[in-house]
Image: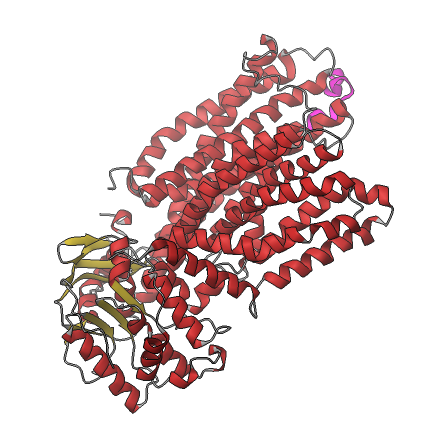
Amino acid sequence: MAEFLDMGGYAVFVWAAYGLCAAALVGLALHSLKAGKQARDRVEALRPRRRKGA
Amino acid sequence: MHRFANPAEFNRLADRILPWSLAIMAGAFAAGLYLALFASPPDYQQGDSVRIMYVHVPAAWMAMFTYMVMAGASFTALVWRHPLADLAGKAAAPIGATFTALALVTGSLWGKPMWGTYWEWDGRMTSVLVLFFLYLGYMAVWQSMDDEAKAGRAASILALVGVANIPIIKFSVDWWNTLHQPASVMRMGGPTIDGTMLWPLLIMALAYKAYFVTVFLWRMKLEINRRKLSVLSQAEVYG
Amino acid sequence: MDQSAHSFDSQTLSGHGLACRRGGRLVFSGLDFSVAPGRLLFLHGKNGSGKSTLLRLIAGFLPASAGDLRYGTDVWDRGDAALSETLVYAGHDNGLKTALTLRENSEIYARIMTGRPIAADRLLDMADVFGLGALLDRPVRYFSSGQRHRASLMRFLLADRPVWLMDEPTVGLDADNRTALATLMQHHLDRGGIILAASHDPIGVAGDVLNVDECNSLAHAKDVAGGAFVAQYNNSLHPFWRED
Amino acid sequence: MAAPLRSVFMAVLARDMRLAWSQGGTGTMALSFFLIAVTLFAFGVGPEPQVLSRIAAGVIWVVALLACLLSLDRLYQADFEDGSLDDLALSPLGLAGVAGAKILAHWLATVLPLILITPLLGLFMHLGADGYLVLIASLMIGTPALSLIGSIGAALTVSVRRGGVLMALLVLPLYVPTLIFGVGAVDAALNMVTPMENLALLGAVSLVALVIGPIASAAALRLALE
């Protein structure tokens, strides 16, 4: 396992590359979801409640 | 003219596509990473550092692909004045910029063991760098004006001017720097690298594309609601 | 003043169901008007009701989000060459280059609009109409705001075109300049010209009145119940965004 | 009868050239920036002739490019602010023709003087003797593209407060081909290789910009008029 992690001596570069990609892509996805939910809630808040009886 | 999806229709369409794109993304990433990190052989020259290629090359492809999507959206927005089209450009831009930045970073990390320096002014990396500036310019125009609809149309004009110049920039940068190793995958005669390395590359590319579709649809929902918010608040002010 | 007395073969300028959305806001909708040759139309309405917006729409600066604009039979599209040969627009800004003299500004305006130079004596007559004859060779940056406004009114003489679009033309004019403007406008109407003026000041020239506010009242239905907000929310949204 | 468009074009051209050198114009500003910025490089890099001559062509081209960009900022904004852009939009020439005339005026009034004094700056930078002619040729062929593409950036940011920085961000990436082929031509000449290929490519870039420039600027200006 250790030998695999070592990546033939290039461990730093390979794992840095994969790590940064993962961080950036996951980060962007989460941000998009969070901001999307926030915007959706604010639109819901602004749109008038359809009262049950109305 | 609004035969194409309006927001409600777009949301329904998006909700039908999202489960599929999520599934493909998960599967392709799993298979791709397994092949890239475990199943494929190290390169006889570069050793295991070649594995960086599997995240670098697809990112560079997506950087260019996303700009083309933005240019197509901009063309639709300007020619058919479709309200959703310029939002599509705005939704795609951050994803494209992220892919471009990743291509630069992973390229530099791959360059260190291969060329001995973190930054080498070679043709392809420099083109990706200029493409990154085009993304920054596009996103900056969106925030530059109070009236978002006008900012969107200005950004669309810029994207079309940009896409017309990309081939010229690409050619001039390659002309300026002829020492870069021939693009191993892009050769007209088809990929010159052998099958065991090609498969992980293509699967990772598929994973990146599925990722793009997923996050693009999420961001489109976000941008549509943001536009509604701004229209609504203006309605209230002048209501 | 030997104003060239040939009359225009102008046509009726008419708008049908015009609506305009500016910066996401519905300025007016369902607006109709018609101005026959030789007629003057005053645009009334409180500030922000869309008087200036309507003038800029006719001038081709703004796209109409609904309805169409016709001059005679042909429909005017934004940026049409025909449109730019037919009308003169005077907005709030005077369009004068302060670094240049009034003579230079006027000559440049005449050549840009007609492609032909303007004779010095005719230019002097035109300047005299607004009492600016003595100021022809002074840089505009020394002009008072009233003088600058009068200088910008000279454009209606410099470009001899049938349709005049005037936005608050009498602002800052003293008595004898108002009469000068009135005679100028009357003369233009007698030659079969068309004038649209966004102004509450009758200037002493006969004309019809279009109240842009009334056209607005349809767009912003005002009633109390929550439903009004829905109507208003939906109504002000671009039809594309409506949730029916 | 239709207004003679040629003389309308000349009228807009003469107007802008006069304004460029009148009070508040950009002519003198671009020229002085060009002189000062190039001399700054000598202070920065040191006076040794071999070092300066090595980077002479690149420095002169980059600073000329920046001077051109700097002077384009007010190309449309000045007219937008005093209302004359509305009048220009109503001229029979149409916005694309007006944009073309203003771009040509900018090139003649602001960029041409820069080119005329490059020999002086060549001396400052110890440029190789046989580089002068090709430097001037490359600037003559390449700088029109700078004005044409810069005009698009100026038109896009005309209604933006402090749009100058944004305009640079939009336009500089598009200047890369002109810069590469321009400096390439001079370097080729200095290395006793024919500069013709570079000059031809430089001309091609300028021709593409000639097609795109006025049209895209007109579309952006129509946006600002709304």
Q: What is the number of callouts on the image? A: 0
Q: What coloring was used for the rendering?
A: secondary structure
- Asked if residue A12 is positioned above or below residue D153 in the image, the reply reads above
Q: Is residue D108 visible?
A: yes
Q: Position of residue D180 (x, y in %)?
A: 64, 37
- Asked if residue B20 is positioned above or below residue C220 in the image, the reply reads above
Which residue is more in the foreground, D4 or B125?
A: D4
- Asked if residue C21 is positioned above or below residue A2 in the image, the reply reads below
Residue at the limit of the structure toward the bottom, as seen here: C175
Q: Position of residue C22 (x, y in %)?
A: 32, 60
In which quadrant of the rendered image does the C terminus of chain D lie?
A: bottom left
Please identify the dominant SS of the magenta region: helix
Q: Is residue A7 magenta?
A: yes
Question: What residue do we see at 59% from left, 37% from top?
Answer: D177
Q: Position of residue B24 (x, y in %)?
A: 45, 22
Q: Is residue A37 visible?
A: no
On the rendered structure, is C58 left or right of B219?
left
- Asked if residue D139 is positioned above or below residue B45 in the image, the reply reads below
In which quadrant of the rendered image does the N terminus of chain D lie?
A: bottom left
On the rendered structure, is B186 left or right of B164?
right
Which residue is more in the foreground, D71 or B210?
A: D71
Q: Position of residue C91 (x, y in %)?
A: 34, 70
Q: Is residue B171 magenta?
A: no
Question: What residue do we see at 34% from left, 66% from top?
Answer: B237
Magenta extent: A1-16
Residue at the limit of the structure toward the right, as seen here: D48
